[in-house]
């Protein structure tokens, strides 16, 4: 695996492969890699001739009171994990390499970030869209892989590709979970020994909603009430949001018809965890 830190070197490394007709896959990450990331690498390796993983903690997507400074970092271990997963190129730029000057041009979004995480993290998805666009321009991949855990991010990236005419196929990969159902996240490391077992309540609340929908419940208020009740049973949980939204536009739904994305963000102490599931009304 090649480890590359400069944008120029990355372009040079990819040029020949592109000329030779290689199908290039990109997996953007912020590092502190876990099995969720590895599942994206594996999918990319299966479908592409050359897989680039990027590892960059993007300051643009963190608010002033968020965890940019303390976001967990372990680049050496990440490089080993990526190499073991058969990633071909690991792009690890410094902040100065990605943003040599404070950006004057960046992306703004309309509507799609008014709900869910966008509401509690102003500027976050614009920071994500901007860095993902930069990575798309640098790597020019044929395919890009993102986790479905960050459902709103995936929806934003899909619109980025459509609205700015990137010729890139975006693939959303299934959430990878710990044995008790907690979705894997680099931020799980922040959880205390008391908080960690309680965090499993998130998955239980989603499973209950799935079960209710399979039994015919379509009233979103009732689903949300029951989901909140389950989460509320964990003493250390504080709900940021629980919403059912249209899976593409992310606008809130009042009644389920077809499918709806049930998404939640819950604090355990200072750690904010997100999770989601697609609720599908059973066809008669
Ligand atoms: O999901 C992440 O880790 C980040 O938001 C991403 C897509 C790498 C952009 O910084």
Image (cartoon, helix red, strand yellow):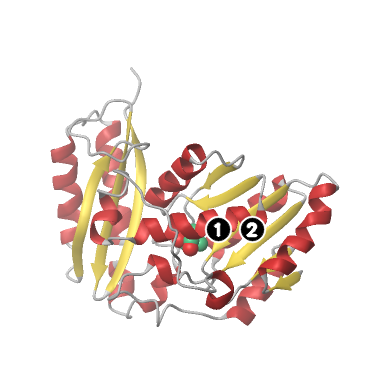
Quadrant where the N terminus lies?
bottom right
The residue depicted at 61 percent of the width and 73 percent of the height is 93
Quadrant where the C terminus lies?
top left
Q: Element type at marker 1?
A: helix
| Ligand 1 neighbours mark 2 (CB distance < 8 Å) | no
Q: Residue furthest top?
A: 284
Specify whether 264 is left or right of 57. Answer: left
Of 92 and 237, which appears nearest the observer?
92
Specify whether 165 is left or right of 123. Answer: right
Q: What whole-number distance in Å separates the C-alpha atoms at marks 2 and 1?
A: 6 Å
Specify whether 226 is left or right of 215. Answer: left
Q: Name the spot of residue 134 as percent of width and height, x first.
A: 55, 58
2 and 1 marks in contact (CB < 8 Å)? yes
Q: Name the spot of residue 175 as percent of width and height, x first.
A: 47, 52
Q: Place residue 256 in its image quadrant.
A: top left
Q: Element type at marker 2?
A: helix
Q: How many numbered discs?
A: 2
Q: Place residue 117 in its image quadrant.
A: bottom left
Q: Name the spot of residue 183 as percent of width and height, x first.
A: 41, 60
The residue depicted at 32 percent of the width and 80 percent of the height is 192
Of 268 and 58, which appears nearest the observer?
58
Q: Residues within 10 Å of mark 2 (few under 14, many from 20)?
A: some
Q: Is residue 74 above or below residue 103?
A: below
Q: Name the spot of residue 230 as percent of width and height, x first.
A: 19, 55
Mark 2 lies on residue = 138
| Ligand 1 neighbours mark 1 (CB distance < 8 Å) | no
Number of the label disc, if any, that sits on residue 134: 1
Q: Place residue 220 in its image quadrant.
A: top left
Number of the label disc, if any, that sits on residue 93: none
Residue 189 visible in rendering: yes
């Amino acid at each position: 695996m090649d480890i590359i830190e400069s944008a120029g070197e990355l372009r040079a490394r990819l040029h020949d492969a592109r000329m030779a007709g290689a199908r290039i896959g990109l997996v953007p990450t912020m590092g502190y890699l876990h099995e969720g990331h590895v599942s994206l690498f594996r999918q990319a390796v299966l479908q592409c001739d050359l897989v680039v993983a990027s590892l960059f903690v993007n300051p643009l997507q963190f608010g002033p009171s968020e965890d940019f400074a303390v976001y967990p970092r372990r680049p050496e271990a990440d490089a080993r994990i990526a190499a073991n997963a058969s990633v071909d190129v690991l792009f690890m730029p410094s902040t100065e390499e990605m943003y040599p000057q404070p950006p004057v041009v960046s992306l703004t979004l309309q509507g799609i970030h008014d709900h869910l995480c966008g509401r509690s993290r102003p500027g976050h998805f614009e920071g994500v869209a901007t860095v993902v666009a930069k990575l798309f321009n640098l790597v020019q991949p044929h395919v890009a892989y993102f986790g479905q855990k960050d459902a709103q991010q995936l929806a934003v990236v899909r619109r980025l590709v459509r609205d700015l005419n990137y010729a890139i196929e975006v693939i959303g990969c299934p959430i990878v979970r710990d044995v008790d159902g907690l979705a894997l996240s680099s931020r799980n490391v922040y959880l205390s020994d008391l908080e960690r077992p309680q965090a499993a309540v998130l998955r239980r609340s989603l499973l209950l909603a799935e079960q209710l929908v399979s039994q015919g419940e379509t009233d979103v208020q009732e689903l949300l009430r029951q989901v909140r009740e389950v989460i509320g049973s964990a003493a250390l949980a504080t709900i940021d949001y629980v919403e059912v939204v249209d899976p593409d536009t992310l606008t809130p739904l009042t009644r389920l018809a077809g499918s709806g994305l049930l998404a939640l963000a819950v604090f355990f102490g200072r750690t904010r965890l997100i999770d989601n599931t697609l609720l599908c009304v059973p066809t008669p």
